[in-house]
Amino acid sequence: MIAVAVLGHGVVGSGVVEVLERSRASISKKAGTDLYVKKILDIRDFSHLPYGHLFTKSFDEIVSDPEIRVVVEVMGGISPAFEYVSAALRAGKSVVTSNKELVAAKGAALVQLAREHGQNFLFEASVGGGTPIIRPLHQSLVADEIDEIVGILNGTTNFILTKMIQENMGFDEALKIAQKLGYAEANPAADVEGLDTCRKICILASLAFGSHVYPDTVEMQGITNITLEDIQYAEDENCVIKLLGQTRRIDGKCFVSTGPCLVSKESPLARVDDVFNAILVRGEVTGDVVFYGKGAGKLPTASAVVSDIIDCVTAEGPIATLQWSDSDGSNVIDAREDVCPRYLRCRGKGLLAKIGAAFGEVHILRRPGKPADEEAFTTAPVSGYELEEKLAALASQGVEVLSNLRVWRP
Amino acid sequence: MIAVAVLGHGVVGSGVVEVLERSRASISKKAGTDLYVKKILDIRDFSHLPYGHLFTKSFDEIVSDPEIRVVVEVMGGISPAFEYVSAALRAGKSVVTSNKELVAAKGAALVQLAREHGQNFLFEASVGGGTPIIRPLHQSLVADEIDEIVGILNGTTNFILTKMIQENMGFDEALKIAQKLGYAEANPAADVEGLDTCRKICILASLAFGSHVYPDTVEMQGITNITLEDIQYAEDENCVIKLLGQTRRIDGKCFVSTGPCLVSKESPLARVDDVFNAILVRGEVTGDVVFYGKGAGKLPTASAVVSDIIDCVTAEGPIATLQWSDSDGSNVIDAREDVCPRYLRCRGKGLLAKIGAAFGEVHILRRPGKPADEEAFTTAPVSGYELEEKLAALASQGVEVLSNLRVWRP
């Protein structure tokens, strides 16, 4: 018999309890031992629940209980989650979390701490919800060198962009529908400004390349400024606009970026719609592998947490393939070093001549009702440094840049 | 230091040696110990190779070597592969294979034998080439009940069908191109008649539902009779024709089938082209998860084999989540019990009236140049038993059935 404690009885926490209760027999069979929830930490009152007697407001009660072998952290946020997780690992318990903010901020330290104490710190549910990605990345693709990871990692923004693309709906209206359907929070900033995607691509980059990538070292752009005009121009380039997290190995370091990109309709990522997520992993020998599924949801996420619990129970000691070291940020290149084609939308007078002077040959895009003082185009591959110079030249001639997006072609 | 032996130096075997040599440092780091190839079994002469001194023609030399901890079986076929794998497991060595024929025929026995001897029998490379599917299925989705698996599991036939669909090319011509490009064998029977797909869906069904599914108990149809007419009619139904392996949980048993199906273009599976594979796993709580990648290739497959080797080395004892029991075939329902819509193409006189009398309302399909004595249509969901009756009624009225395919809608 193995006892589990759950820290936080929110959406995911209650889902974990539900999955463990509902499938206790089959889960226990697969774990090779009976698994049960012994304690749930939450400061709120849940005494009305059938399992109301499991609740405690004292973390000490959990950390000092030798029967509790696995602690599930689903509170969210950095503090006190970080302190609780650290204490649990030090007390010789394995920890499972769905908290991407925690993993993105403290992953290296917690993986290391777990290892020192002969325990595991697992976080499958932090990226992709119920879609397996963390474990395939460090385990199944272990014999390959990862070259690149590109993902649609946030269901809320993908839902909004899908509405904009398919129904010609403006951002604000699409956001309202997402909120009504429960896909977006009342305060949607973390989603629509790209922070959620940024945390997730940092976790994937850390795991794939072995050195921690901190979110605050990463280029980040949200989707709040994407307009229907951009969507129409993208269509003319045979592309859709998707919010991508991307990372690539470059000369022993890595490029990491979060932002809306033009994605060729030829790519499998272009066809990922609504709240679905998809993660393309390009291995040196494996080629492109894509993982596709719902990126969120109470029970899918809970199911991923429970699979990690089973891993903690069946593993003897730390899982060898899951490791990355801390970093001082020098593992991440300045995003301006990356060379890729760009999509630009500008306003001004005599645009075509000015654009031609700055960029040479470009692909001018069309949309119905385009005003005379607006042009949109895609460029040849260009570095961020070159781009800055060209944009400065345009600005000095009175050209206003309304949109500036990377173009991602598989 | 851990020594590995490789049985068979064909495409995959030489790939395994290549991957292990090329990435020895990073693989050894991830495995936590130095991994090296000590012996290679092959009856052919490879003494000219740089590692020619590793070859042996004696399996006894391998099985009796206590330094060899992992045996890689990449010979193919049942015999002597089965005898060698059994002997290796009995000698306390773990075994990794890419041999789907062996796993489909003997999986339950070998998983059990491995367990008895405290070893692992792993076969990630037997399905999906380098695309991770076996491990996610038993490990990442362990906390969920699998309801259904539907896959495009054979790259050769998917390449042929893609040529037929996109370039309006006949089967024979598309097959010849596949052979020229090395995608199809000189004798393509195992691919085009569905046997390869059948073996793979049997492995996935066994793993997902816990009881061995033997290929000879499974409904199987190849793509050799698919014509351009069928492809055109499918288009009119907004579908493409794909060779699917499918399995579903039904009342504690499972339905398993291999055959070309009409797949709605709305499905992510419809967009999987060329030699790519994709496997859709529908979990009770996780919903649809899709794994997409190249299903074959020397190095991708070798990379999957090597990830299994690392698993064998880092696991302490048998991996708990990988288990299924043997069966007497009663775990698989008669495929005729499955109820699904059908696509039928018929020839005869007064067809519309006869079809209406047999099937009631159907969806009549169109194609350019349709002769007056031909009709194609899709039916409402119908069981195989009902279908047999209706087809008998049509036959008694002189109607010839030219095509009979399942329709799969997600």
Image: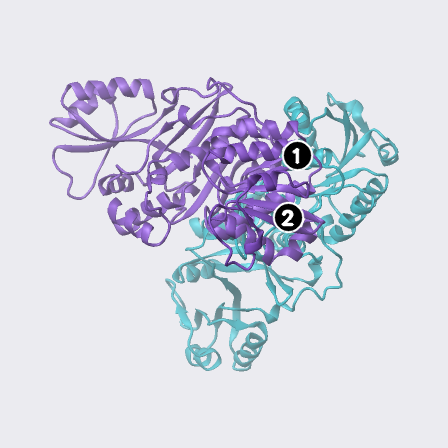
Chain colours: A purple, B cyan
Q: Residue at x 47, y 17 (%)?
A: A330
Q: Quadrant of the N terminus of chain B?
A: top right
Disc 2, SS = helix
- Packing grade of label 2 (10 A; few <14, some 14-19, many >=20) is many
- Give the image location of residue A9, x and y in percent: 50, 48
Contact between marks 2 and 1 (CB within 8 A): the answer is no
Q: Depth check: B55 or A24 in front?
A: A24
Q: Name the amino acid, label 1.
A: Gly
Q: Depth check: A117 or A230 in front?
A: A117
* Chain identifier of the residue bearing label 1 in the image: A
**Left or right: where does residue B269 sit relative to residue B133?**
left
- Packing grade of label 1 (10 A; few <14, some 14-19, many >=20) is some
* Chain identifier of the residue bearing label 2 in the image: B
* Picture disc at residue A304: none
Q: Nearer the viewer, mark 2 or mark 1?
A: 1
- Give the image location of residue B384, x and y in percent: 58, 72
Disc 1, SS = loop
Q: Which residue is mark 2?
A: B138
Task: Decide: is A132 above or below B234.
Answer: above
- Give the image location of residue B11, x and y in percent: 67, 35
Q: Which residue is mark 1?
A: A92
Gap in angstroms between the C-alphas marked 2 and 1: 27 Å
**Left or right: where does residue B45 sit relative to residue B200?**
right
Q: Depth check: B211 or B62 in front?
A: B211
Q: Name the amino acid, label 2.
A: His
Q: Depth check: B299 or A399 in front?
A: A399
Q: Residue at x 64, y 45 (%)?
A: A310
Residue B276 appears in the picture as rendered:
no
Q: How many marks?
A: 2
Residue A245 appears in the picture as rendered:
yes
- Give the image location of residue B80, x and y in percent: 81, 45
